[in-house]
Each structure stands twice: as structure tokens, then as C-alpha cells.
Image (tube, helix red, strand yellow):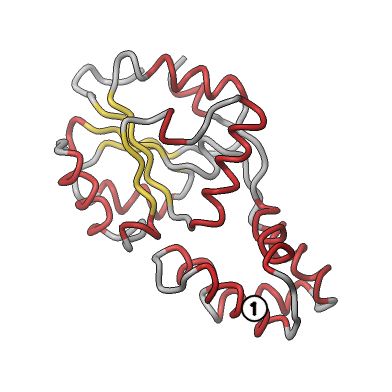
Amino acid sequence: MISSHIKNLLFDLGGVILNIDFQQVALSFSKLSEKDIPFIRQQIEERRLFYNHEVGKWTDAEFRITVNHMLETSLTDEQIDQAWNSMLFDIPQERIKLLKELRKTYTLYLLSNTNAIHIQEVNRILQRDHQIYSLEDLFDKTYYSHQIQLAKPSADCYQYVLKDAGILPKETLFIDDSALNIQGAKQIGIQTVHLQTPATILDIFR
């Protein structure tokens, strides 16, 4: 049950709205490069592949160059993007329906640690499966780490959203599947729900 003082709902994307599997990235890069998965995972961590792309330190082109250096390959942009996007699955119809219903009562925001390549693919999934043009059609405003150049769980990231949206932390409920991200939001007074598998957002609003 959501408290009556909540006016704003702030959602994470991957693992909350969108079904994902981070392990697919290492598997896909391994198949393309014929390097083993432990090596790929180590390289991803050492090069901070996700973080540097997500906070806009690298352009998409620089990210792809880094991947080829990392794998010692000459993959095309399309091959890299397909492997990078392999972690993105689907958005179930019932979650779309729930967001539309919630928007009648609350102001909805999206805050995601993400990158331009992934957002383009998520929007393609929305168009293909739900005839919805983009995530912007489901939320009052979207905040992407690569655009604001701030990432969860940094307090600065949450403060940016609160200030830009003109909303109060005590009136805002943040839903994320990461315990670290939840803790970061709690520290500045945002109300939170830690979504843990197998629960989905439907369970929160029953």
C-alpha cells in the first residue's frame, strides 16, 4: 500500500520496467571474439565499460572502439551494438498497463543508469511490441545517466532529479532492484521500495 502523501513515482528501468540479464553481454562478446567469459567479465570490470558509457565519458563511437580494443577484434558497429543490446529483453504488457493507470494519480519519472545505444533499443522494443514510440510517452519526464552525466547511487544524481523536477523527497517513492541504489536514495530522504525477484512492480501496487 502506497502512503497517501506520495505524489511522485520514480522508477528504475532495467529489472523494474524492462526485463534484463547482464550476463548476456559477456556471453555475446565471448561468442564474437572467441575469448572466454571470465576474461570478458574481467575486462568489462577493469575498463569500467558500463560506467564510462553510462555517465557519458565515452561517446557511442568511443565505446565501440574500446570494445574492439578489449576483444582484439574488428567488429562492425552493428555487431557490437547487437551484443551490447543482448542483455535487453522485453517489457510485459501488464507493466505498460500499470504505468498508464498510475499516471492518472501520480506524476511518473524514470531514472536509469544507461546509454544511448540501449535507450535506442528499448524504444525499438516498445515500438515493436506495444506500438509506443518511446519511453518518454510513458513518463512525465525521463532522466538518463548518460545525458545528465550523473549515475545512481550518487546523491548528486538524485538531487539533480529532485531539483529539475521540482519535487520533494518525502513526496517521492523510488523503485529500484539495486540495494545500493535504494540506499543512496534513502540517504537524502526519498521514500523507497527495493524490488527483489521474483516480485514485480505489479506486486507493489496491488
- Please tell me in which quadrant of the rendered image residue 85 appears: bottom right
Q: Nearer the viewer, residue 128 or 179?
A: 128
Q: Is residue 168 above or below residue 96?
A: below
At numbered mark 1, what does the secondary structure look like: helix, strand or loop?
A: helix
Which residue in the protein does label 1 denote? Answer: 42
Q: In the rendered structure, which amino acid carries the disc numbered 1?
A: Gln
Query: Would you identify the image quadrant in which residue 124 lies?
Result: top right
Q: Quadrant of the N terminus?
A: top left
Q: Residue at x 59, y 38 (%)?
A: 197
Residue 192 x, y percent position in the rendering: 33, 37
Q: Position of residue 58 (x, y in %)?
A: 46, 73
Number of callouts: 1
**Left or right: 107 in relation to 88:** left
Q: Is residue 166 left or right of residue 183?
A: left
At 49% from the left and 56% from the top, the residue drawn is: 116
Q: Quadrant of residue 69?
A: bottom right
Q: Position of residue 159 (x, y in %)?
A: 20, 51
Q: Position of residue 56 (x, y in %)?
A: 40, 67
**Looking at the image, is 24 positioned above or below residue 162?**
below
Disc 1 crowd rating (10 Å Cα; few below 14, some 14-19, many 20+) is: few
Residue at (54% x, 29% y) in the render: 200
- Which residue appears at 17% of the width and 34% of the height? 170
Depth check, front residue: 73 or 99 = 73
> Is residue 129 positioned above or below 155 on the image?
above
